[in-house]
Image (spheres, helix red, strand yellow):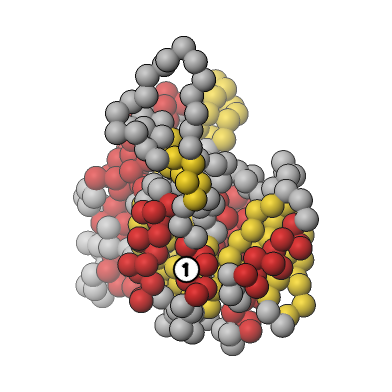
Amino acid sequence: MRIALGVSGGIAAYKACEVVRGLFKAGAEVQVVMTRNAERFITPLTLQTLSGRRVLTDDWDDPDAVVQHIELSREIDAFVVAPATANVLAKFARGVADDFLSTFYISVTAPVVVAPAMNTRMLVHPSTRENLAALERRGVKIVPPGSGWLAERETGAGRLAEPDAIVEAALAAARRSSALEGRTVMVTAGPTREAIDPVRFVSNRSSGKMGYALAEAAQRRGARVILISGPVDLPPPFGVDVVRVESAVKMQQAVERHRPEVDTVFMAAAVGDYAPVAASSKLKKTGGPLELRLEEGPDILAGLGAHKDGLLLVGFAAETDDVLAYGQSKLERKNLDYIVVNDVSRSDIGFDADDNAVTILGRGREPLTVPKAQKSRIADAILDHVFASAGDA
Ligand SMILES: Cc1cc2nc3c(=O)[nH]c(=O)nc-3n(C[C@H](O)[C@H](O)[C@H](O)COP(=O)(O)O)c2cc1C
């Protein structure tokens, strides 16, 4: 595994040493790229000694005269920048390429992780916030800064995240396999919104986190991934094609449109079962109760199950009682290959939580119980189980 570590000119540059050591200990080869200003805070010699490689600062001093930012961009599994200055974030967000680090960034196609570090005033400035949001939208993973004692002898947000957290994020971004190469996987995620009138809607508590984690995990295993997402507040996973929809009907249309391209579907979205007949103009207060009549919406999963043609179909069931019995009956009724069931009556797992605990039921297979863990780990367990039987663990 080869990781490029960018170091820019902030007071936390010395902590890059810990990041190099952590990556090295995990077995990664590390190529350090520094800005000129970073060299004012820490010498290239220190990082060169720790990484065992010549530090790169610009293209101009290369004895072999190769275009190093392009060469290196072809070889790496991930690019992590720690610390990332406000300046570097701005350059990355706008595509400014006026030194080695920023030119390298716009050459990289591997996943990018940035760990910002700066004084609180710089961090909360609208330009920094906008730059971070733009990077996140583009699939860059942000390791958020923590709060604590800052170099300016004051306390506040902006401290570089702990080196261990940065190492973990970089390794997670770099870890890929080719197990699902050649497969195209569709994942649906999040809630749907069913309009009552132009300003109001009926929805549910799904955060989309489980579906997004599955999409990310499948992409890391080499699958092409199409993520059909209801309205959620999550950044798009790196390398995944995201199709955004609002209502159950729009989700059904998107699923049907992409169905011919895919061999596997994970229906993790919490699709609204019922929808009001939407009023074309805003409903006014009448001084009395308002009755809403709800009509049953499309059953996307059953539709897929009815015409499988070799499709590997995985459903999800979020239930509050008789979770396993309900899951088993849904598996059979909707002609699924697997169903992932979870108990959403628990507040520590399921809807909107970062953790989940599930049981995977499959045709002709023993149920697999995956105990409480982060949704990214649950996603890996689901993929391991589902694709092991298809021969592509
Ligand atoms: C003592 C000192 C400490 C600094 N610390 C930070 C910092 O922690 N974060 C930051 O974004 N900028 C910091 N700056 C400002 C950057 O060094 C400055 O914006 C510079 O242009 C960044 O260059 P680079 O992004 O090319 O490395 C600091 C400047 C000085 C003089």
Q: Residue at x 48, y 79 (%)?
A: 308
Residue assigned mark 1: 303
**From the viewer's perspective, is 187 left or right of 146?**
left
| SS at mark 1 in the image | helix
**From the viewer's perspective, is 108 left or right of 114?**
left
Label 1 near ligand 1 (CB < 8 Å): no
Spot occupied by residue 288 in the image (x, y as percentages of width and height): 49, 15
Depth check: 135 or 145 in front? 135
Spot occupied by residue 27 in the image (x, y as percentages of width and height): 59, 70
Q: Residues within 10 Å of mark 1 (few under 14, many from 20)?
A: some
Q: Is residue 303 visible?
A: yes
Q: Name the amino acid, label 1.
A: Gly
Residue 25 figure quarter:
bottom right
**From the viewer's perspective, is 7 left or right of 26?**
left
Q: Is the residue 370 above or below the residue 190 in the image?
A: below
Spot occupied by residue 17 in the image (x, y as percentages of width and height): 55, 52
Q: Is the residue 264 above or below the residue 90 in the image?
A: below
Q: Residue at x 24, y 45 (%)?
A: 94
Depth check: 116 or 391 in front? 391
Q: Residue at x 47, y 68 (%)?
A: 303
Residue 257 figure quarter:
bottom left
